[in-house]
Image (tube, rainbow, N blue to C red):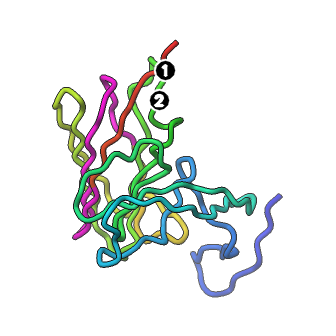
Amino acid sequence: MVSRKADNSGVGSRPRLSPVALLVVAAAAATGGCSTDGDAPDAPSTSARTVATPTAAVSTPTPALTVPGDECVNSSGYSYAQRGDLSAGPFTREAVVLPPQRTEAKLWVASQRAGQDDAALTIVDPSGKTERQIRKSGDAIVVGTPQFYPGIIRVGPPGQYRIDVRVGPDHLCVLVDYSRPTG
């Protein structure tokens, strides 16, 4: 049974969450701690973060890839990629090796910039076929993340997919190697 403290701050107010109770979406889709464009390193780097779920405060190292400048780098094997206020994922092995019958992969986008910007995605598959998506702001709420955009992309032939993401003035480009299990 879940109990909540009475909150007399007004009708329709949301229950308050403890600082430890962060909502993690789509396999450790935690975001934040992003550097600003001016702080971006010259080469991709990785970082480890502590991630807490709403049910338990368990520390889990989460490798992330920081994308320098406006480059498009391979993010396969990382939990997520980030550039400035923008991040996207998951790109772990479990997320990019798809069973033969699956034609979709999870792909979330998050922005640390306050606002109501839509996310515009351009996905190019290995054959050159382009898919465009517009994800509306406000469709999902994640504690500590001003804008969060859950969703999926279509995955056809195995190979490298180019994913360009724009949210407001921010841009992130990643290359992801989607594959099928062998053996």
On the image, which quarter does residue 159 sit in?
top left
Q: CA distance from mark 1 to mark 2?
A: 6 Å
Residue 14 x, y percent position in the rendering: 60, 73
Image quadrant occupied by the N terminus: bottom right
Say which residue appears at 67% left-offset and 58% top-offset. 53
Which residue corresponds to mark 1?
Answer: 181
Which residue corresponds to mark 2?
Answer: 97
Q: Earlier in the sequence, mark 1 or mark 2?
A: 2
**Residue stretch in magenta:** 152-172
Amino acid type indicated by mark 1 = Pro
Say which residue appears at 22% left-offset and 70% top-offset. 169
- Is residue 71 rendered magenta in the image? no
Residue 167 x, y percent position in the rendering: 27, 63
Q: Describe the element under mark 1 as helix, strand or loop.
A: loop
Tell me: 115 left or right of 106. left
Amino acid type indicated by mark 2 = Val
